[in-house]
Amino acid sequence: MKTKKYQDKPSIKLNIDYIIDLYTNKKISCSKIAKIHNLNKSTIRRILIKNGIDTSLKPNKYYTNRKNKILKMIHKGFRFQYIANKYGITKQRVNQIAYNNKIHRQKNIRKKYKKLINKIYQYVQNNPYATYQDIRIKFNLTYGDMGILRNYHGLNLSLSSILQNRNKSIINDYFNNKLTATDIINKNYGITTQQAIYKICYSSGHYHKLRTKYNLKKRYFEKKEIFDLIFNLRNNKKMNFKNICNYLNDNNYKTIYGRKFRINNVKYKYNKSKELLK
């Protein structure tokens, strides 16, 4: 939409001296003067510039007070977007005010995060089995804050010697001492879920398989009675795989994952039973 030029409208009689007086003496902004005369803000600025008045400098005390308040909020650590929303300006304008006053926000943020990371390391040394969730609750951090600390500021708890020793002891309990995940959780390593135990034990990239106390040799993770039953039903009673599957489900037999048997699952276990029961 084109602006209305005051030169092209002879019917509009402007008192230029009155406009200059409002701006210079009464300290009224261009936008308020434009509302009084039903004109655009740019039109008032053109009038003032033609009469030798610099409009880049804000004569109103409101702007200087606002600038001081913005600087205080920046020093306190408020986010630029929050300050911009509060005072009705853009985030870039807040950044410009900080830059003109030689406030380097990134340096302050780096110092702040370094202090925080040192506090976290001290907390982990005093609490060797602390989890990420414990750290997050202790220092009032969100999951996003933890990601920023890990990805951009070098927080790496998995490489600390304390957590390495904890992980070694968990792996030793799981593979050598033949403890289950629930038994390891009860030893108070600071881990509350089985999934976290499996993640530590199979961190080298091996596929995770659930394991019970009734393990067979050759890394087959099913009870021996299931293999014996499937082999007996197939070879001695001459049942097909579908009938075997129905028989197991009717008698409330469950897989190692606690689910119902399927035909493909029965076939797989029958083939393994032939290898085991030779």
Image (cartoon, helix red, strand yellow):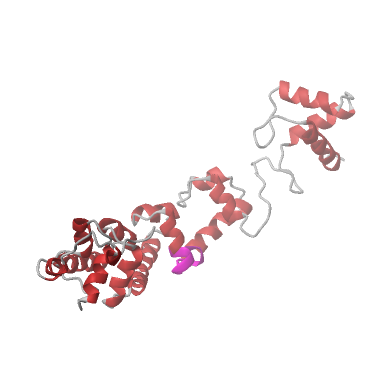
Assign the N terminus to one quadrant of the image: bottom left
To which quarter of the image does residue 7 belong?
bottom left
Comparing 26 with 220, the one in front is 26
Is residue 160 magenta-colored?
yes
Q: Is 242 located above or below residue 108 in the figure?
A: above
To which quarter of the image does residue 124 belong?
bottom left
Residue 203 rendering spot, x and y as whole percentages: 61, 58
Residue 13 rendering spot, x and y as whole percentages: 19, 62
Q: Is 25 located above or below residue 124 in the figure?
A: below
Q: Is 236 located above or below residue 203 in the figure?
A: above
Which residue does the image show at 59% across and 47% down from the upper left?
A: 179
Comparing 135 with 35, the one in front is 35
Magenta residues, dominant SS class: helix
Q: Quick check: can you spot residue 119?
A: no
Residue 230 rendering spot, x and y as whole percentages: 81, 30
Tally of numbered discs: 0
Residue 261 rendering spot, x and y as whole percentages: 73, 30
Which residue does the image show at 54% across and 43% down from the upper left?
A: 182
Which residue reaches farthest top? 250
Is residue 187 magenta-colored?
no
Which residue reaches farthest left? 25
Which residue reaches farthest front? 10
Assign the C terminus to one quadrant of the image: top right
Which residue does the image show at 53% across and 58% down from the upper left?
A: 167
The part of the chain drawn in magenta is: 149-161
To which quarter of the image does residue 180 belong?
top right
